[in-house]
């Protein structure tokens, strides 16, 4: 594993580097989506502000999952480069997009639709950063041939292996790779759905609803392979958030679908 890349006196965190690459790719997707919809918007500013809001939300959500530990010594944890939660990034990014939609006079649901495919791709690429750095996003021990070990990662697998009753040098599920591959599929589905809904003049918001459902289902299932502690009804915090995402996405999708094409709002608010 390579948590850091050293170039002379410069040290770069591989996770942060892959997140930056993910944001750049998301920018190109968002710009192309705006173009095919005939919407004039500053994709650079939107993706930059949304990306920062997503990272802030991901960090805060992760910290508030263990509030007692956080408030006991908040400042060092607040500015640490370790520990980010996927659902927190969704919340932070959602808030930023709603504010930016108002600023750029774009219908909010249209803004969320455009951001969905971009977010799916950016998230997938960011997961490669988790893999390279070995930041603890791996799964439980496995004997499958593609299992991996992270003895030199930011969060080594050795302790987790022992806790699971496996040898210290055991291999684990490389869940970041799973999420990367599935994230690419979700990106492709959302992009194709966008083209289809444009041709049929479907309501704004359907792509965002599909994003919530697809990403929620994937994260819910991936958590069965992860080593996160259980909290609500035997589910992890991420599974609880994922379930809420799926439910909200289904309700939004059905509501918009039943209203039909006439529910579509003008492209400019």
Image (cartoon, rainbow, N blue to C red):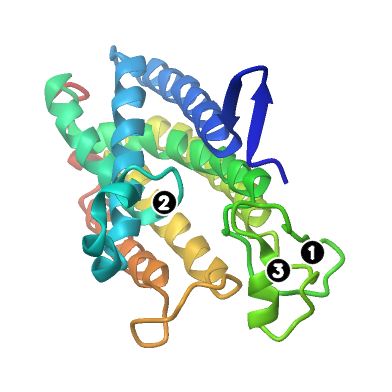
Q: Position of residue 263 (x, y in %)?
A: 19, 42
The residue beneath circle 2 is: 84
Q: Position of residue 144 (x, y in %)?
A: 83, 70
Near-viewer residue (217 or 166):
166
Q: CA distance from mark 3 to mark 2?
A: 21 Å
Q: Quadrant of residue 236?
A: bottom left
Q: Secondary structure at mark 2?
A: loop
The residue beneath circle 1 is: 147
Q: Secondary structure at mark 3?
A: helix
Q: Compared to 231, does 254 lie above or below?
A: above
Describe residue 201's horizontal placement relative to residue 148 as left or right: left
N-terminal-most mark, 1 or 2: 2
Viewport quadrant of the C terminus: top left
N-terminal-most mark, 3 or 2: 2
N-terminal-most mark, 1 or 3: 1
* Residue at 41 percent of width and 49 percent of height: 211
Q: Compared to 27, does 265 lie above or below?
A: below
Q: Position of residue 142 (x, y in %)?
A: 76, 74
Mark 2: few/some/many CA within 10 Å (<14, 14-19, 20+): some
Q: CA distance from mark 1 to mark 2?
A: 23 Å
Q: Nearer the viewer, mark 1 or mark 3?
A: 3
Mark 1: few/some/many CA within 10 Å (<14, 14-19, 20+): some
Please, which residue is most extreme toward the right here? Answer: 145
Q: Compared to 230, does 107 lie above or below?
A: above
* Residue at 78 percent of width and 68 percent of height: 171
The residue beneath circle 3 is: 158
Describe residue 197's horizontal placement relative to residue 9 as left or right: left
Near-viewer residue (247 or 199):
247
Number of callouts in the render?
3
Q: Compared to 64, does 161 lie above or below?
A: below
Q: Is residue 248 visible?
A: no
């Amino acid at each position: 594993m390579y948590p850091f890349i050293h170039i002379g006196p410069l040290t770069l965190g591989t996770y942060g580097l892959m997140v930056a690459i993910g944001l750049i790719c998301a920018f190109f997707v968002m710009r192309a989506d705006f173009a095919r919809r005939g919407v004039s918007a500053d994709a650079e500013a939107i993706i930059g502000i949304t990306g920062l809001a997503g990272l802030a939300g991901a960090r805060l959500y992760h910290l508030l999952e263990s509030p007692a530990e956080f408030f006991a010594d908040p400042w060092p944890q607040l500015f640490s480069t370790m520990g980010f939660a996927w659902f927190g990034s969704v919340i932070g990014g959602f808030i930023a997009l709603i504010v930016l939609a108002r600023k750029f006079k774009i219908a909010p649901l249209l803004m969320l639709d455009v951001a969905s495919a971009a977010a799916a791709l950016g998230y997938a690429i960011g997961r490669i950063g988790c893999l390279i750095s070995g930041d603890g996003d791996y799964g439980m021990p496995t004997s499958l041939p593609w299992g991996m070990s992270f003895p030199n990662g930011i969060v080594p697998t050795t302790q987790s292996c022992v806790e699971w009753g496996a040898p210290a040098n055991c291999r684990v599920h490389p869940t970041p790779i799973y999420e990367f591959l599935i994230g690419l599929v979700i990106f492709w589905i959302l992009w194709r759905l966008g083209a289809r809904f444009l041709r049929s003049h479907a309501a704004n918001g359907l792509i965002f609803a599909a994003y919530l459902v697809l990403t929620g289902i994937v994260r819910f299932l991936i958590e069965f392979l992860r080593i996160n502690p259980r909290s609500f009804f035997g589910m992890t915090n991420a599974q609880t958030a994922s379930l809420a995402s799926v439910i909200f996405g289904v309700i939004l999708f059905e509501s918009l679908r039943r209203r039909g094409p006439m529910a579509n709002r003008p492209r400019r608010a």
